[in-house]
Amino acid sequence: MSDPLDREHRSDLRVRYAETDQMGVVYHANYLVWCEIGRTDYIRALGRSYAEMEADGITLAVSEATMRFVGSARYDDPIAVYTRLTELRSRAMAFSYRIEHASAGRTLVTASTTLVALDRTGRPARLPDVVLRILRGEARDTASDGPA
């Protein structure tokens, strides 16, 4: 079995006009939205969706986010978001992201987020064993294999 921290997931998107600012470049906060897309796609590719975790009474709250901007994207640019799980604990997880201009292969942003699991009352909670096993690559949630 491969190390779950070696897995990288790619999400593809295209810059929408609404994501750009008056100067015609992507507004900086949208890169964080793209990190969320990468993170949810990463987890879904392993066989579990955020919605299913929430149905189990667990939400994931971002407790830390860092971003380094090294380039900019413009309207209609193809974008690739590369996501990796970098840390997994009983109550938290961390991800790293590399956002690239997909056709030029040029890095635009590198980022990281840390998320804490919360229960229905908003208190820190242990991640369910099934979620930990899925994120470690030890199991797959077959309930998620249907249409997205």
Image (cartoon, grey):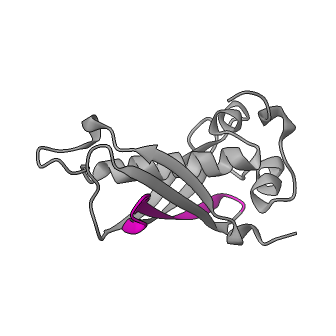
Looking at the picture, tell me which residue is in the foreground, 54 or 24: 24
Residue 106 vertical position relative to residue 139 in the rendered view, above or below: below
Residue 11 appears in the picture as rendered: yes
Q: Residue at x 42, y 58 (%)?
A: 103
- Say which quadrant the N terminus sits in: bottom right
Q: Position of residue 12 (x, y in %)?
A: 51, 48
- Say which quadrant the C terminus sits in: top right
Q: Is residue 101 left or right of residue 62?
A: left
Q: Is residue 34 magenta?
A: no
Give the residue at the far front of this rendering: 103
Q: Is residue 100 magenta?
A: yes
Looking at the picture, tell me which residue is in the foreground, 115 or 5: 5
Q: Residue at x 73, y 35 (%)?
A: 56
Q: Position of residue 146 (x, y in %)?
A: 78, 29
Main SS of residues in magenta: strand
Residue 124 appears in the picture as rendered: no
Q: Residue at x 27, y 54 (%)?
A: 28
Q: Is residue 86 left or right of residue 78?
A: right
Q: Position of residue 108 (x, y in %)?
A: 35, 65
Counting labels gives: 0
Q: Residue 44 is drawn in which quadrant?
A: top right
Residue 98 vertical position relative to residue 18 in the rendered view, above or below: below
Q: Residue 8 is drawn in which quadrant?
A: bottom right
Residue 126 vertical position relative to residue 14 in the rendered view, above or below: below
Looking at the picture, tell me which residue is in the foreground, 65 or 58: 65
Q: Is residue 111 left or right of residue 4?
A: left
The magenta-colored residue range is 90-108
Q: Is residue 4 left or right of residue 113?
A: right
Give the residue at the far left of this rendering: 22
